[in-house]
Amino acid sequence: MSTSSASDDAKTSPEEDASEDAPGSDKATLAENARCPGTVITSQANFLRVVVKPDAMTPAKRSLRDAQFDEAIARASAARRDDDVARLERRKADHGPHELLCVVRALLKKIKQRVLVGDGVDVNTIDWVDGRAVVEHVHARSSTVRSIHWSPYDRVGVVHADP
């Protein structure tokens, strides 16, 4: 009778862990294929709506998206949810811009990196079926919009774009 547990078999050496994240490894390739560039279109509380355009998605990113939908369709079929299967197949066939509900990565909040409407961002940990993701990186801004408050009661906005 063996005294080792299943958790002992799952342990790997630090060298094996490091090799999994090395550039060119399957794990690093999967992480790169999961990241998509997008643009913030709305911001409210802790949530952002980000649009990912189809031309920003490589074939590998599209295949990951399709695989998520295929898995969800299989689960819905097994549960005999024909209405859900039809809805998921329609969404899978949609190649238009994809809108995702995102949260900002905790590290960006910690370093007080603000994410504003119009910012270019990279989203990761994308759940295409539920339309959710995490904003991982904010691209450099080319301009900003400022609002000037004239009194504590009335808001008058003056827009000025800095090149």
Image: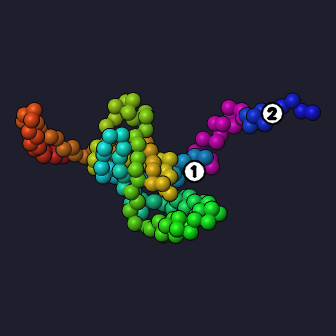
Please tell me how crowded label 2 is: few (under 14), some (14-19), or many (20+) other residues with Cα within 10 Å.
few
Magenta segment's dominant SS is helix
The magenta-colored residue range is 12-26
Color scheme of the displayed model: rainbow
In the picture, the disc for residue 30 is 1
Instruction: Pick whichever of labels 2 and 1 is earlier in the sequence.
Output: 2
Judged from the image, the secondary structure of the residue bearing numbered disc 2 is: loop
Q: Is residue 148 visible?
A: yes
Residue at position x 78%, y 36% from top? 6
Residue 134 position, x and y percent, is 44, 44
Q: Is residue 10 left or right of residue 96?
A: right
Amino acid of disc 2: Ser
Residue tagged 2 = 5
Quadrant into which the N terminus falls: top right
* Rendering coords of residue 124 (x, y %): 47, 47
- Between 61 and 91, the residue placed more toward the observer is 91
* Left or right, 122 with reference to 8: left
| Residue placed most toward the observer, 160 or 125 | 125
Answer with the quarter of the image where residue 137 lies.
top left
Is 94 left or right of 146, judged from the image as shown?
right
Q: What residue do we see at 53% from left, 65% from top?
A: 84
The residue sitting at the left extreme is 150
User: What is the residue that sits farthest to the right in this orientation?
Assistant: 1
Above or below, 49 relative to 18: below
Indicate which disc residue 65 carries.
none
Residue 150: in magenta span: no
Report the Cα–Cα distance between label 2 and label 1.
30 Å
Residues 18 and 12: in front is 12
Q: Are marks 2 and 1 in contact (CB under 8 Å)?
A: no
